[in-house]
Image: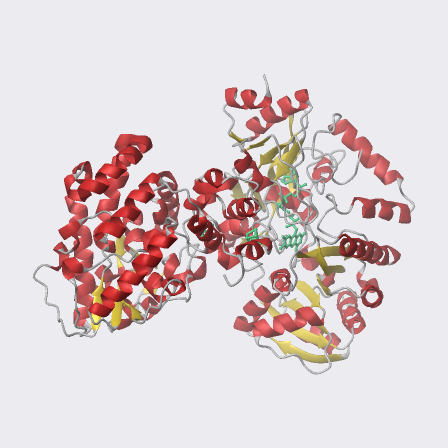
């Protein structure tokens, strides 16, 4: 029985016509996948298990897909593959404020989860700028970060347990409702950031926190990125924690100014947006004192309305940059590196020199509170020459991060795009054996290499 | 859309934000073909001639033109607008859509309901000299007849309905089978809403002119179903008709006609009339001590402007917002009723639950299509009924 007959007999919904599978060949990266044999729309883990059992038997590649917002090509379909769309698994199964967890299916979108939790006074902190569309399963699989990452950390900090279907169709559970656990290897962590190469996550126990409602948002302008980097480091060194700390270069600063109507003080090159939590009362003064001593060109404390506008403008910065594209075929390829806070000033200086050297149109912004810098490279993806130049830039941008004890991928994962960079990172850290370990794990959990093959690394 | 379609579509970065808000995606059990991103991707293929029109027709036809996608798209693209343009370009048309288009061209009415459009106005006073034309565009009147078509589809099945469409067209609504499915109470309910609209305007001191049986439909469905040539000719006819009646100011009473005449029609014809939404002329404030929730119409929120005059009228009333409100308002699913009734049912059910879960005393609508699709219990009330009552 071939796969499609099998799915029909098992009463599992699938799509196989060309017009039906085309919507699944792309994600938000510049890669285009190839037509899959089918897209399946399972309703529960048992159906996923049946699909995988058959695919394992028949050696058919399987690509899990959540919101399809990946920026690295990790969710594009592969030739001859089956795409498993997780969107029908979109129920919130259980909530417990007292036990501080929410149990959800993998296809729940992050914003939907948080609007549910908001009504209960709680928050699931990971907040990638794609939270409108990205899903619990997808964000776990890329270990997504976001604006709140500096205070709360990235997705990995919030996963208590997972329900997973393995490559051969077996169903397992890791972790659970409990907030701590010391019982052997931490299998939950293994699947965080695995990009669908080790198993299909069908549900998750997620840690939640009460919302911090009381905070002040300020905008600080600087002449030099270095001064901004130092300010952030000092804030953290003095034991203070911003709820979020976002920086932008001049191009993006001007966009935010245009949207919010808040003028940029003369001589400013860099903008820092900080959310100061007001917990015990005098945090604001402590933050401001440090900032005042860091050579700012201006400080603006925002009222509620301005605060909302500026937040939206920052969250939508990538969108605004997209609208700055001037040429046909122009895309924005995003470099996504991270360095320790103490290294931010120097890393930013070197990045500025690198941009000058390459002469590309690039805008920098990022979650600077946790050392995450995004380089948005405007590139015509139809021009080989430009693509090569952009790739070279991203390689050297990655090298800057490595020289400063950082990583080539902060939150977007590896996918298709960063496979070479990942190897580069392991070599730089004199630990290429990491790659061997990853491959060994992959071989144990997916001996036939059917799960999202060719993503993260080539076997 | 100021640039060519292929350039417009190529700006899409495939982020999928539009899918997250597209009502038809979830209603179609997450079949990407019926989602906003699917529509854009299929448009990309169609433009390259990598797929046939026939294969993609349902994807574009099922778009509600609710514009929810435009509001969240980082690249500023509307999958709704793309669907509309491609429908206009396509030579393939749905037979039922053809039947409706023929009716509009022939009878100036999508279902040829004849005198059915004027019953509500019996005994009311109008002023031939008034500067305000009260233009119902037959929208409220048409709703019970639309439901009859949907009912008949349910009974006959898709195939037979489409097969008989040409006969219905010849016989008109009255002479055909369709009339068996018409519910009298529904006709009265909608006539009553029209009466209330008339009343609140009268109470606000506005005198109205009404064209009675001569009043034509607006032509909106021609555009919705992709009949561009026909719409252009209809729009020209409409302009001349209004001119011949010496019309200057048109008071529309439903959001679809309002946005069509105020914005969309201008791409096809010079439309030299002032277009007003009737709530602008209402000078009463509602006085109600309970709570209401408002189902804001997509056309009032996301087409050309954010029309929110009703907030003034309801400024003394406690409003409880549903999960999706203001520019994120969620479509009632109505525009799919004729061609994709299953999608409409699921979307309207979802929206009704959202509104109902506010536990407000009333659920206020302001569009006949929203009203008929959301009228799932007594709490649902047209804004004119609410203003007249309180
Ligand atoms: C405009 C924009 C802004 C962004 N901003 C951020 C940001 O601020 N921070 C950030 O971290 N990322 C960001 N991203 C990147 C992207 O949104 C994240 O990588 C996100 O985590 C992907 O989630 P998804 O549900 O869309 O997953 P998909 O793209 O569908 O999949 C991502 C990977 O996870 C796998 N996968 C999906 N679901 C499952 C499952 N249930 N089980 C196993 N594997 C699965 C897929 O196979 C794929 O390898 C942004 C993207 C866009 C387009
Ligand atoms: S939201 Fe816009 S850019 Fe994103 S997939 Fe939809 S049309 Fe494309
Ligand atoms: S206009 Fe509405 S129905 Fe059409 S694609 Fe956009 S969100 Fe979906």
Q: Nearer the viewer, residue B1 or B19?
A: B1
Q: Which residue lies furthest to the top in this view?
A: A1
Q: Which residue is found at the position 33% from the left and 52% from the top? A: B221
| In the displayed structure image, the side of residue B221 where residue B89 appears, left or right | right
Count how many numbered circles sit on residues in the image.
0
Q: Which residue is found at the position 74% from the left and 55% from the top? A: A336
| In the displayed structure image, the side of residue B166 where residue B15 appears, left or right | right
Q: Residue furthest left?
A: B123
Q: Which of B67 and B294 is in front in this view?
A: B67
Q: Can residue A66 be seen in this view?
A: yes
Percent position of residue A273, x then y: 66, 69
Query: On the image, which quarter does residue B303 sit in?
Result: bottom left
Q: Is residue A91 visible?
A: no
Q: Which residue lies furthest to the bottom in this view?
A: A266
Colour scheme of the rendered structure: secondary structure
Q: Residue furthest right?
A: A430
Q: In this view, does A21 lie above or below A448?
A: below
Q: Nearer the viewer, residue A76 or B381?
A: A76
Percent position of residue B150, x then y: 28, 40
Looking at the rendering, in which quadrant would you find the C terminus of chain B? bottom left
Query: On the image, which quarter does residue A255 sit in?
Result: bottom right
Percent position of residue A416, x then y: 74, 43
Q: In this view, does A102 lie above or below A153?
A: above
Percent position of residue B165, x then y: 27, 38
Query: On the image, which quarter does residue B108 sit in?
Result: bottom left
Q: Which residue is found at the position 35% from the left and 66% from the top? A: B262
Q: Which residue is found at the position 71% from the left and 43% from the top? A: A193
């Amino acid at each position: 029985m071939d796969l499609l007959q099998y799915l029909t007999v098992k009463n599992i919904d699938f799509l196989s016509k060309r017009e039906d599978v085309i919507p699944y060949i792309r994600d938000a990266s510049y890669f285009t996948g190839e037509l899959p044999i089918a897209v399946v729309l399972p309703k529960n883990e048992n159906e996923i298990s049946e699909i995988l059992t058959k695919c394992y038997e028949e050696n058919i590649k399987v690509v899990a897909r959540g919101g399809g917002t990946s920026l690295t090509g990790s969710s594009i379909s592969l030739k001859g593959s089956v795409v498993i769309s997780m969107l029908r698994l979109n129920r919130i199964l259980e909530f417990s404020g007292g036990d501080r967890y929410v149990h959800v299916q993998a296809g729940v979108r992050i914003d939907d989860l948080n609007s549910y939790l908001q009504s209960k006074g709680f928050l699931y902190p990971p907040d990638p700028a794609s939270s409108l569309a990205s899903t619990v399963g997808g964000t776990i699989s890329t270990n997504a970060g976001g604006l709140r990452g500096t205070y709360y950390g990235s997705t990995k900090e919030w996963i208590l347990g997972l329900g997973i279907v393995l490559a051969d169709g077996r169903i397992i559970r890791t972790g659970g409702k409990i907030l701590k656990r010391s019982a052997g290897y931490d299998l939950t962590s293994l699947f965080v950031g695995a990009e669908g190469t080790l198993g299909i996550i069908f549900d998750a126990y997620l840690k939640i926190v009460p919302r911090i409602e009381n905070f002040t948002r300020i905008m600080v302008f600087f002449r030099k990125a270095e001064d901004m980097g130092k300010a952030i480091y000092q804030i953290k060194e003095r034991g203070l924690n911003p709820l979020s700390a976002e920086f932008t270069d001049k191009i993006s600063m001007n966009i935010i100014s245009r949207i919010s109507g808040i003028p940029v003080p003369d001589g400013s090159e860099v903008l820092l947006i900080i959310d100061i939590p007001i917990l015990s009362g005098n945090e604001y003064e402590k933050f401001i004192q440090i900032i005042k001593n860091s050579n700012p060109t201006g400080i603006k404390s925002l009222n509620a309305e301005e605060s909302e506008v500026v937040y939206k403008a920052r969250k939508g910065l990538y969108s605004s940059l997209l609208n700055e594209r001037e040429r046909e075929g122009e895309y924005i390829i995003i470099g996504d590196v991270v360095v320790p806070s103490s290294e931010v000033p120097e890393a930013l200086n070197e990045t500025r020199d690198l941009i000058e050297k390459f002469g590309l149109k690039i805008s920098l912004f990022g979650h600077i509170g946790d050392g995450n810098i995004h380089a948005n490279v405007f590139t015509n993806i139809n021009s080989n020459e430009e693509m090569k130049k952009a790739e070279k830039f991203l390689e050297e941008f990655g090298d800057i991060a490595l020289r400063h004890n950082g990583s080539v991928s902060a939150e977007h994962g590896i996918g298709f795009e960063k496979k070479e960079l990942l190897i580069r990172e392991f070599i730089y850290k004199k630990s290429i054996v990491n790659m061997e370990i990853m491959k060994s794990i992959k071989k144990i959990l997916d001996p036939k290499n059917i799960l999202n093959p060719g993503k993260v690394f080539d076997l | 859309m100021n640039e060519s379609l292929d350039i417009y579509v190529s700006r899409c970065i495939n982020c999928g934000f539009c899918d997250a808000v597209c009502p038809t995606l979830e209603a179609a059990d997450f079949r990407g073909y019926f989602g906003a991103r699917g529509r854009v991707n299929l448009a990309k293929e169609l433009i390259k001639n990598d797929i046939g029109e026939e294969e993609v027709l349902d994807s574009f036809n099922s778009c509600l033109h609710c514009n929810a996608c435009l509001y969240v798209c980082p690249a500023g693209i509307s999958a709704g607008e793309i669907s509309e343009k491609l429908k206009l370009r396509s030579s393939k048309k749905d037979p039922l859509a053809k039947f409706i288009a023929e009716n509009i061209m022939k009878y100036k009415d999508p279902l040829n309901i004849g005198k059915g459009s004027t019953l509500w106005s019996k005994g009311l006073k109008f002023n031939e000299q008034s500067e305000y034309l009260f233009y119902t565009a037959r929208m409220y009147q048409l709703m019970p007849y639309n439901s009859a078509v949907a009912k008949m589809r349910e009974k006959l099945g898709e195939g037979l309905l489409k097969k008989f469409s040409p006969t219905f067209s010849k016989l008109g609504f009255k002479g055909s089978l369709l009339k068996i499915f018409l519910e009298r109470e529904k006709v009265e309910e909608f006539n009553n809403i029209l009466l209330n609209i008339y009343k609140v305007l009268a109470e606000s001191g506005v005198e109205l002119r009404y064209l009675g049986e001569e009043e034509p439909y607006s032509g909106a469905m021609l555009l919705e179903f992709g009949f561009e040539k026909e719409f252009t000719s209809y729009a020209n006819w409409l302009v001349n008709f209004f001119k011949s009646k010496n019309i200057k100011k048109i008071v529309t009473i439903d959001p679809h006609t309002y946005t069509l005449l105020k914005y969309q029609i201008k791409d096809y014809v010079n439309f030299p009339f002032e277009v007003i939404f009737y709530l602008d002329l209402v000078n009463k404030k509602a006085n109600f001590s309970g709570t209401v929730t408002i189902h804001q119409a997509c056309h009032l929120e996301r087409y050309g402007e954010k029309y929110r005059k009703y907030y003034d009228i309801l400024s003394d009333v406690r409003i409880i917002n549903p999960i999706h409100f203001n520019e994120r308002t969620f479509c009632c699913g109505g525009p799919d009723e004729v061609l994709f009734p299953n999608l409409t049912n699921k979307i309207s059910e979802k929206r009704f639950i959202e509104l109902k879960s506010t536990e407000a005393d009333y659920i206020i609508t302001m569009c006949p299509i929203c009203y008929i699709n959301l009228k799932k219990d007594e709490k649902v009330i047209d804004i004119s009924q609410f203003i007249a009552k309180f």
